[in-house]
Amino acid sequence: MKDYINTVTMERFAADIRIQTILMFAHAGYGHIGGAMSISDVLAVLYGGVMSIDPKNPSWEERDRFVLSKGHSGPSLYAALALKGYFPLEELKTLNRGGTRLPSHCDRLKTPGIDMTTGSLGQGVSAAMGIAMGVRMKGLECYTYLIVGDGELQEGQVWEGVQFAAHQKLDHLIAFVDDNKKQLDGMVEEICEPFDICDKFRSFGWNAQIVKGYDVKEIYQAITQAKKEVGKPSVIVLDTIKGKGCNFAEVVDFNHYMVISDEMAEESIKEIEKKLLKE
């Protein structure tokens, strides 16, 4: 992993992930748009330059592993995988349809490139800890990456896993918290105040950082710093906005799940492209 990235290339990849995800949802007519948008940038960094992977050999033993614990954001991961060549882009149109390899929540038995089935909040965290432990027992140097939602942190199972990872000194485990401030029923702070997320992870023995979750350079630099930590797992809190980068999703209060038309998608994609040209 280099100490620098081509920011323009990463931002283009993040935009393409958003565009393909929006098109996917428009074709289906609905989808979990909010959380899918807020992790597009970190997915672009991971799959665009950080992770050691081989799309032609998804089961390569020495690959880095990735667990999307907030599994309802799976479509953005599918977009990243398709863009990397794990399966044809055209297949994205089959999201949630009968016989698809792309169900609403990630399923490792169906989709090439998915390392862990997720959807039941909290369980992906435990799975990621087990995967990190397992690859270390095999003597592999690969990393395990995990994305967990800020609302998902309310699950007690999350903190059992966090304590386990610190006790086992899983320093090849890097977690991201999608701190987009919203969950299904409203604002996270109103439903169950999260307090200082970094402080909580540090109290459990983790290295913790916070970055702008929509800044690919900051995300990349935080991962570079996390890899220097020895003897402890790392968490990177992504301070972001639910629906980030999708004009119709950013401006509404409820954007966990939305009905999406072709017209909404077309307008949003034009805005994404326009923003890239300005930058």
Image (tube, rainbow, N blue to C red):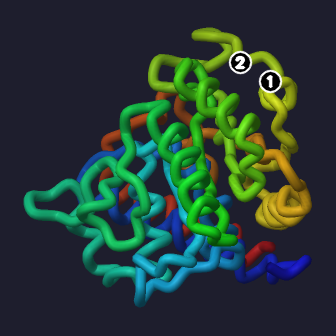
Residue 240 in the image, given as x and y percentages of width and height: 71, 43
Q: Which is closer to the viewer, label 2 or label 1?
A: 1
Question: Helix, strand, or loop for circle 2?
Answer: loop
Real-space CA distance between mark 2 and mark 1, rounded to the nearest whole angstrom: 9 Å
Q: How many marks?
A: 2
Residue at the spot 88% in from the left edge and 55% down from the top edge:
230
Quadrant of the rendered image containing residue 20: bottom left
Image marks 2 and 1: residues in contact by CB distance under 8 Å:
yes
Residue tagged 1:
200
> Which residue is rendered at x = 26% and y = 61% of the image?
109
Q: Position of residue 226 (x, y in %)?
A: 85, 56
Q: Is residue 97 above or below residue 194?
A: below
| Left or right of residue 225: residue 113 | left
- Could you say which disc has been placed on residue 243 in the image? none
- Nearer to us in this view, 80 or 119: 119
Residue at the limit of the structure toward the bottom, as seen here: 56
> Image height check: is 177 above or below 47?
above
Q: Secondary structure at mark 1?
A: helix
Judge whether residue 248 can be spotted in this image.
Answer: no
Q: Which residue is mark 2?
A: 194
Tag 2: residue type? Pro
The quadrant of the rendering that contains the N terminus is bottom right
Q: Nearer the viewer, residue 173 or 80?
A: 173
Position of residue 67 relative to residue 85, above or below, is above
